[in-house]
Image (tube, rainbow, N blue to C red):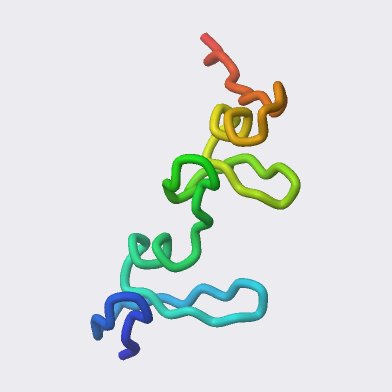
């Protein structure tokens, strides 16, 4: 049994995440997100979806990127559902 590196919980169903050759042990996706997800440079929320990157800075959405960078790009692309 391994302890979660975020909350310290000893749990028999912990899981390992390997990123950039570093090994991490978590007991929940919540703890994994808290440790590994980037933070939006504009609003401060965790980027757990695709997000947007501009010049090496991460944003949760195109709106935050446009607000922070004072640019007209990027634009979110959302497709209408096929019916």
Identify whether 61 is placed above or below 82.
below
Give the answer, above or below, for where 20 lies relative to 78: below
Residue lying furthest right: 55
> Which image quadrant is residue 25 in?
bottom left
Residue drawn where x is 60% and y is 30% of the image? 62
Split into 4 quadrants, where in the image is the N terminus? bottom left
Percent from the top left, x then y, of residue 71?
71, 26
Q: Nearer the viewer, residue 62 or 29?
A: 62
Residue under the point 32% across and 67% down = 28
Q: Extreme top residue here?
A: 83
Q: Disc count in the image?
A: 0
Please state which of residues 1 and 77 is positioned toward the viewer in this rendering: 77
User: Vertically, is 78 above or below 44?
Assistant: above
Look at 44% across and 68% down and name the residue there.
Answer: 35
Who is closer to the viewer here, 67 or 73? 67
Q: Is residue 49 left or right of residue 71?
A: left
Q: Residue at x 41, y 75 (%)?
A: 15
Q: Residue furthest bottom?
A: 1
Q: Nearer the viewer, residue 10 or 82?
A: 10
The location of residue 43, given as percent across then percent down, is: 45, 41
For residue 43, side relative to residue 67 (left or right): left
Q: Position of residue 54 (x, y in %)?
A: 71, 42
> Whole-percent x and y of residue 65?
61, 34
């Amino acid at each position: 049994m391994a302890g979660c590196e975020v909350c310290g919980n000893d749990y028999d169903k912990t899981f390992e995440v390997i990123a950039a050759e570093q090994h991490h042990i978590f007991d929940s996706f919540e703890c994994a997100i808290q440790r590994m997800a980037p933070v939006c440079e504009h609003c401060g929320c965790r980027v757990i979806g695709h997000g947007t990157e501009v010049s090496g800075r991460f944003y949760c959405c195109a709106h935050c990127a446009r607000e922070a960078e004072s640019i007209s790009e990027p634009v979110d692309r959302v497709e209408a559902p096929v019916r």
